[in-house]
Amino acid sequence: MFNLTLMWQQWQQHLGKALWLTCGFALCCALFALCMQFGSILFQPTPVWVSQSQQYFTLARVQQDGRLAGINRQALLAAGQMDNIAQAGYLFPRPGQLMLPDGTEHKFNLVYFSPGLPDLLGLPLSGDHEKGVYISEAMANLHFASAEAAIGQRLSHPRLAHGLVIQGILPASVNQLGPWQNDVFLSGEYMHMLAPFTNEPMLSRFLLAVPGYYGILVANPKAQLKLSAEALTERLSAMDLSVQGMRMDTAGSKLLVLPGIQLQPEKFAHLYRLWLLAIVLLLGLAVLLVANTTALFSHQAMTEMENNRIRLVLGADMLHLLRPQWLMATIMLTLMASIAWLLLKLGLAALHQLPGLAQYLQTSDLSTSSGYFVIAILVMAILLGCCMHIPLWQMLKTTLFNRQMTKAASRGQLMVGQAMLCLQLCLATGIVSIVFAVAQDRWRFEQQSNLPPDLIQQSVAQRPRSVLIQPLLSGQYPGLAKGDLALSDRAFDQPISLMIEDPRFSKAVEVGVLRVSPSYFALLSLSGDRPPPDWQQGVIVNQAAAALLQDAGFEQIKGSRLDIGFEGKQNIIGQVANAPHTGRYNAPMPMLYLPLKGADNERHTELHFYFASSPADSLEQALETWLQTAMPGARITHKRSITEVVAAQDRLANQLLGGAALIALLLLGVVVLNLYYQLKAKFSLQRLDFGIQLAVGAPLFVLYWQNVRGNLISLLVAIGLTALALNWLSIDGLTFSVMQTLASGLFLGIVISLVTWLPFIPLQRTTLASLLKQQ
């Protein structure tokens, strides 16, 4: 009880800053644990649907934007024959039409797996994997009375005489395999129904050459040499993996082996940058906390210096002096652990919302994070112990005269405080500059996308057949005036990705492709050129694609010819503004718009209609009537406003921005609060000097200027250092400028001026006698 009372007497003036530092250490502890778990996933990713403990590798082809594309089976067989590879399997995603027991035909996402793959990965599938198929619970509930009622039913296909027996329902963990929604999970033995022909020799060669396989390799645990993804990539790239007589286009991509099971490496590349940013943030926060905690304990030790010397004279030893400090450190650690555990759970919940990462995080418990959390607590305890003991030992080991020691401590504390102020201002300037850059970029993207808020996208699916759309678009159908509707062959947020290898490009570039009707651009309010009403030839590019063409040396965009591969060479007939196909807050995708002809040689499985929602009742009724006559058997799959479609694309960006903004505000708050306490401590050391200057007639503003001048000089140094650091550090998606840094400095200059003035407010109510008594 005595130590508790003594601790309270020593720390009651510093409890506010101690509480804030404790919260800072809690944030640092949670970030440390999250970074460790995050890093373990990034460097050896294993999804939650894999229950076996093996060294896995992913074999595929990588495109220019980092996304994966399939390989042919020849490459998979070559990899499986290597000495240091124990087993090889594959996943083969491909949409396909299947007929339900009630006779209706639907398009489903099919994922084929190699024989033995469920055992290789330990997939939680029941029954014989080779004698039936597995469907998702969502598909079972949508098309059958219940999930249990679906088991034993048959799915039909024209190429399969006996159909596909539903063997079981997929566990929730297998419903999503990487980027693919898994509606039907079936053995690769059924892959022959994909082929466009039935001749057996040709069919086998086709299945050997088609680039749609995603290989999963298992390293041989008995191999003498440790296997690496880089070595595997080099060995396989040196082989001839083509199939004689079968030429499949894989231009614009290259073979790649990845560690672990990675089906969305482009997501992991983004997450890796976030992880590095979190590491930098963690280190900066740790340095800031250690320095401020050391300054806090130094100030407390200097305040209690005389009392500690009296206790030593009366027979106390170091343990007596350290017990109140240990008690305070224990309270801080206990509070820090409680807050950090809460922040860790919130952080894990946020990580589960990140696409591409949720499949690699266990959702049932926090056992893995608990180990990292204990390590983080130990690291924070060591840092806190060092911050507590070093100032006290430094204070007690000297035997100098008290006044000399006080002045030396004061000068040292002022020098350390000024260095810490400069460091904090660098961090604060960087944070505010990033916030300004994000705000400016978001405002710029907002200005670029002005889609009508009342625009509706209605998606319709059907069996592959041609659709005559010209009467619908020309206003010849009752209830549908010309310009009321626009059509596309793909959803607004799902354009086809195409690699263009025009000779004028130094390397293949990736663009998005949509087939649209002539009214598409006017209905979406995209400024620029308009195609003719009878648009049948030519391509329209957006501003992002036009910028690519200009960089490639196209002297004039409009009128130039562009080799689009499957469409041959096309004339560029116009240029339009960027539409937010990938969201408003992502870099605009280079887009090519081709005419949606609706001719007999174009067979569509889906069409997407766009119309304004204001006259929706009559227009939708007329459209439904047209669908019944022109597209019998078609069904509406989705109906959403275009703003909802774009908002879904922006959800991840908004979540990341919200998390980053929260952390930025916390750090900025810690910096401002630490600045206040540091200035307050500096003010307490100079009270006698202030009293003397006021006694000889110095105005209060002069004293204020003497203090704020050094802070503003530190701010100028911090602005210069931050500008150099931001110029050297490139953050994807953000554009930094000198004006942003200067604006950040101006904002912080105002904050510093206000914070510096706060300690002078009580000075106005303090008498000169009380100031002159301070020593």
Image: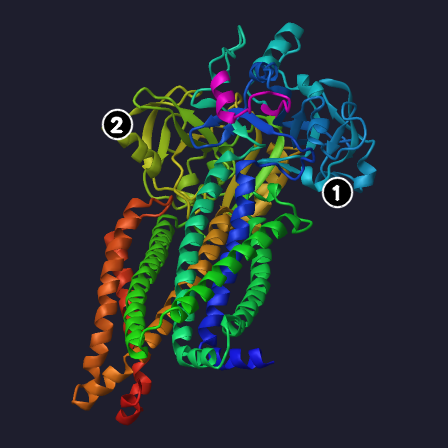
Q: Please, is residue 288 above or below residue 619 in the view?
A: below
Camera sees residue 611: yes
Label 1: how many residues lie within 10 Å, few (<14), some (14-19) or many (20+)?
some
Q: Dividing the image into 4 quarters, which one contains the N terminus?
A: bottom right
Q: Which quarter shows the C terminus? A: bottom left
Residue nearest the viewer, comparing 733 with 552? 733
Q: Name which residue lies at 54% across and 54% down.
A: 376
Write down the residue under mark 1: 141
In this picture, which residue range is highlighted in magenta?
A: 214-235
Q: Amino acid at mark 1?
A: Asn
Kind of element beneath mark 2? loop
Q: Residue at x 61, y 7 (%)?
A: 202
Horizontal arrangement in the rendering, residue 494 relative to residue 402 (left or right) = right
Instruction: Please name the residue that numbered disc 2 is placed on.
Output: 554
Q: Mark 2 or mark 1: which comes first in sequence?
A: 1
Per the image, label 1 sits on a secondary structure element best described as helix
Label 2 neighbour load within 10 Å: few <14, some 14-19, many 20+: some
407 with respect to 192 (left or right): left
Q: What is the three-letter code of the residue carrying label 2?
A: Phe
